Image (cartoon, rainbow, N blue to C red):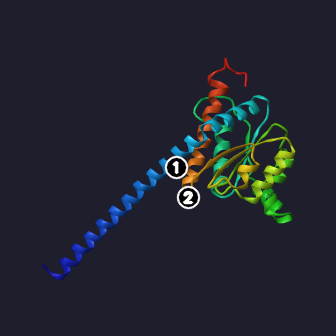
């Protein structure tokens, strides 16, 4: 065997080992994501039902949902709002949901003229009404602009829903309803958040449109 052949074999073996390591990491990531979701639903099942109930009642009463978060949670807010406004799985009338993360002129003017912690609170003061849902999303549960938004929503008589992670942070104490992902991994928390958002959209649709004979909520 030549020296060059030996080097090529070693390189091939190294590539195979690296590929096996990557595959192991991918499998481990998916398994961990599934485990975190299973723990979440076991810990929050009754709370999920209550959140579905309260959102259903609010929408039945002519109220709306205001969603907000930072970074990936801002994207989740927009994603969930779109599922309500357009549709989720069934054909039905559009439902009133607004992501407070989309108007860059409003957000940047508030942040520039006042403070970044006010970007959601001022929007809630402008368009929030008693009985509306204020749905904040944060992996840490401690984002100052969400905490301030919850304070404002509470003063207006709105219903606050928190989607959090880790130990729930201050949001868990402030919210009327808290769904917490008890994980310290931001990606796993975010994956569980969007699953929870999908489940809530699906069950609200079920309550509102799949069982029209039971519309007493």
Percent of width and height locating residue 195: 57, 44
Identity of the residue drawn at 81% across and 36% down: 131
Neighbourhood count class around disc 1 (C-alpha, 10 Å): few under 14, some 14–19, many 20 upward? many
* Front residue of 172 and 67: 172
Identity of the residue drawn at 71% across and 35% down: 55
| Left or right, 66 with reference to 200 | right
Q: Quadrant of residue 105?
A: bottom right
Neighbourhood count class around disc 2 (C-alpha, 10 Å): few under 14, some 14–19, many 20 upward? some
**SS type, badge 2:** loop
**SS type, badge 1:** helix
From the viewer's perspective, is residue 133 above or below residue 136? above
Percent of width and height locating residue 94: 69, 33
- Marks 1/2: CA–CA distance: 10 Å
Q: Quadrant of residue 48?
A: top right
Task: Residue 173: give its label.
Answer: none
Percent of width and height locating residue 62: 79, 31
| Left or right, 127 with reference to 206 | right
Labelled pair 1, 2 in contact (Cβ < 8 Å):
yes
Task: Residue 185: give its label.
Answer: 2
Label 1 vs 2, first from the N-terminus: 1
From the viewer's perspective, is residue 45 above or below residue 142? above
- For label 1, the residue is 36
Q: Quadrant of the C terminus?
A: top right
Identity of the residue drawn at 77% across and 54% down: 147
Q: Quadrant of the N terminus?
A: bottom left
């Amino acid at each position: 065997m030549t020296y060059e052949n030996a080097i090529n074999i070693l390189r091939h073996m190294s590539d195979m080992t690296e590929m096996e390591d990557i595959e192991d990491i991918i499998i481990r990531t998916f398994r961990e994501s599934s485990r975190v979701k299973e723990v979440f639903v076991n810990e929050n099942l009754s709370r999920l039902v209550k959140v579905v109930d309260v959102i259903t009642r609010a929408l039945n009463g002519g109220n709306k949902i205001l969603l907000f978060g930072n970074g990936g949670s801002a994207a989740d807010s927009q994603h969930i709002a779109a599922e309500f406004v357009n549709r989720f799985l069934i054909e039905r009338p559009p439902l009133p949901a607004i992501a407070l993360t989309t108007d860059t002129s409003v957000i940047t003017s508030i942040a520039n003229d006042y403070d970044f912690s006010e970007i959601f609170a001022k929007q809630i003061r402008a368009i929030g009404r008693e009985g509306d849902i204020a749905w904040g999303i944060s992996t840490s549960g401690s984002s100052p602009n969400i905490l301030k938004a919850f304070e404002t929503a509470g003063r207006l008589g709105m219903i606050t829903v928190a989607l959090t992670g880790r130990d729930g942070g201050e949001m868990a104490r402030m919210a009327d309803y808290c769904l917490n992902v008890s994980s310290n991994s931001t990606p796993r928390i975010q994956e569980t958040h969007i699953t929870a958002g999908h489940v809530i959209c699906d069950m609200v649709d079920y309550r509102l449109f799949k069982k029209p004979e039971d519309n007493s909520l």
